[in-house]
Amino acid sequence: MGEQPIFSTRAHVFQIDPNTKKNWVPTSKHAVTVSYFYDSTRNVYRIISLDGSKAIINSTITPNMTFTKTSQKFGQWADSRANTVYGLGFSSESQLVKFAEKFAEFKEAARLAKEKSQEKMELATTPSQITLPSPTQELATGDLQSPLTPESVNGTEDERLMPDATQNTDLRVDSNSMLFPHSSTITKHWEAELTALKGNNAKLTAALLESTANVKQWKQQLAAYQEEAERLHKRVTELECASSQTSGIKIQKTELNQTIEELEAVLKTKEEELEQLREKVQHANHLQTQRDSVSEKLKETELHNQELEVQLRELERRLESSQHEQEAFRKSLGSLLELLDGKIFELTELRDSLAKLIEGS
């Protein structure tokens, strides 16, 4: 099946600063997916996290690893193979607890897998019980000088480390197998043991190279620490030389402090004056705004007055025209009254005349 994800969560990823070994350096700008993977072919567990196409965590879980919760939402573990310390910041405490539980579970599974592999290796490297030929067989062979031993098949311990000795051992095994057909099983067993020893030798060589690289790194760090110690020693010497001038420095410091206090007092006064000026400017701006508003209202009032004056002139003109019309009407009405009085007088005379005529008849 290959390598498959078995648990995933999201967290902010950090690594310890390789220079200071104290500060955390974020390796992701935002929360990313952090997953546990299981490789069924190699029977190993890994923690992998990708930021885009970049792998920011690639840590194989080993039995000696420990996941430490340093706060309610932050945890860390050290990876000696990657020579770094990883840190994860979660959004909640429950996510941190779940991740820690999975870490402990897979760490235990890695421990059990390692023990099983060691048991298999021990079984593979344990020599089986060898049946030596009988005395009659020894007499029959005639050429046999000594029984088969681990040294005769694999050579001595010094010979195992030398390629030429290995070749001689192979030739010796071939010759012995020709002499003893019944020992083919023993030969195969010792060949398997030789292969295992070669594998162990390769692993030891790789571990030696890794240790050599670590020693070189430690030497570099030691040299850096020595340089830092020398620099600090020189600094201490300079400070000791400068300590003789502390009295003059204290006097200058006192004078500078007095000057600073005076300057601070002047600065405070200037700030107060500046604040007053700001208030005056704000007041002036407020007055200017009011004046502009009053000017606009005054202009509106003048326009309204002009309109009212035009309307007044029109009313005066109409009033004068109305007065003229009323005067003419009054005159015509007086003429009509005079005419009516004359008509009434004539009618009165006519009535009187008719009344006399009636009386006379």
Image (cartoon, grey):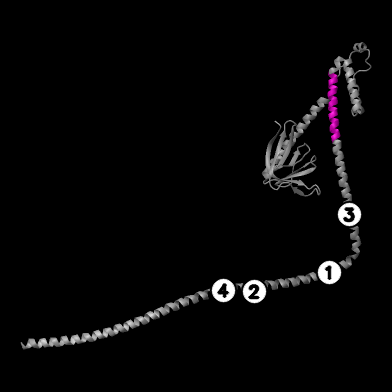
**Closer to the N terminus: mark 3 or mark 2?**
3
Residue that numbered label 2 is attached to: 280
**Closer to the N terminus: mark 4 or mark 3?**
3
Q: Is residue 96 left or right of residue 17?
A: left
- Magenta stretch holds residue 205: yes
Mark 1 → mark 3, Cα distance in angstroms: 31 Å
Percent from the top left, x then y, of residue 160?
A: 90, 27
Q: Is residue 192 left or right of residue 338?
A: right
Q: Residues within 10 Å of mark 4 (few under 14, many from 20)?
A: few
SS at mark 4?
A: helix
* Residue visible at 12% across and 88% down in the picture: 352
Residue that numbered label 4 is attached to: 292
Residues at badges 4 and 3 in contact (C-beta under 8 Å)? no
Q: Nearer the viewer, residue 308 or 176?
A: 308
**Label ID, residue 231:** 3
Residue that numbered label 1 is attached to: 254
Task: Inspect this view and state whether residue 14 appears.
Answer: yes
Percent from the top left, x then y, of residue 30?
A: 69, 47
Rendered position, 198 above or below 19: above
Which quarter of the image is occupied by the N terminus?
top right
Most prominent secondary structure in the magenta stretch?
A: helix
Mark 1 → mark 4, Cα distance in angstroms: 56 Å
What's under tag 4, amino acid-wise? Asp
